[in-house]
Image (cartoon, helix red, strand yellow):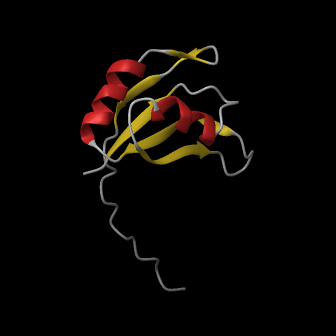
C-alpha cells in the first residue's frame, strides 16, 4: 500500500530529482511531485512524495519533519486526500 506525504515550505530552487534523493534514504519512493504555478512556472513551495511502503513513509516523517533543506525547515506530514468535488453544470447559453 502506497502512502502519500505532503511536503511544505520547500526551497523554491529544489527540483524533483533532489527531493526524491532526500526521501529515498528512507525507502523506495514511488513518485515525487512539486507543485508549480501555471502562470510563473515557479514552485509554489510545496509538493508530494509517495512511498511504496507505509513504514518507509512513517520513517521519513520522523526523520525529515522540521529538518533543514537548502536553508529552509521543511514540514513533512501525511497528505490528506482531496474531497470529491461535485461537477457543476454550466447553464445553457
Residue 47 against residue 83 in the figure, above or below: above
Q: Residue at x 28, y 30 (%)?
A: 58
- Of the pair 25 and 41, the residue shown nearer to us: 25
42 displayed left or right of 59: right
In the rendered image, residue 85, in percent from the top left (x then y), is placed at 34, 61
Q: Residue at x 72, y 50 (%)?
A: 39
- Of the pair 17 and 79, the residue shown nearer to us: 17
In the rendered image, residue 45, in percent from the top left (x then y), is placed at 59, 32
In the rendered image, residue 83, in percent from the top left (x then y), is placed at 30, 53
Residue 28 against residue 83 in the figure, above or below: above
* The quarter of the displayed image where residue 5 is located: top left
* The quarter of the displayed image where residue 70 is located: top right
54 displayed left or right of 63: left
Residue closest to the far right: 40
Q: Residue at x 47, y 35 (%)?
A: 24
Q: Residue at x 40, y 42 (%)?
A: 28
Q: How many marks?
A: 0
In the rendered image, residue 68, in percent from the top left (x then y), is placed at 54, 14
55 displayed left or right of 38: left
The C terminus appears in which quarter of the rendering? bottom right
- Of the pair 54 and 42, the residue shown nearer to us: 54
Amino acid at each position: 500500500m502506497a502512502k502519500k506525504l505532503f511536503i511544505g515550505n520547500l526551497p523554491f530552487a529544489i527540483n524533483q530529482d533532489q527531493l526524491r534523493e532526500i526521501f529515498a534514504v528512507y525507502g523506495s519512493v514511488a513518485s515525487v511531485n512539486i507543485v508549480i504555478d501555471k502562470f510563473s512556472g515557479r514552485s509554489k513551495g510545496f509538493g508530494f512524495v509517495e512511498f511504496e511502503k507505509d513504514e518507509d513513509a512513517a520513517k521519513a516523517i520522523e526523520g525529515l519533519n522540521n529538518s533543514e533543506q537548502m536553508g529552509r525547515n521543511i514540514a513533512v506530514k501525511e497528505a490528506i486526500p482531496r474531497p470529491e468535488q461535485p461537477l457543476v453544470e454550466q447553464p445553457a447559453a
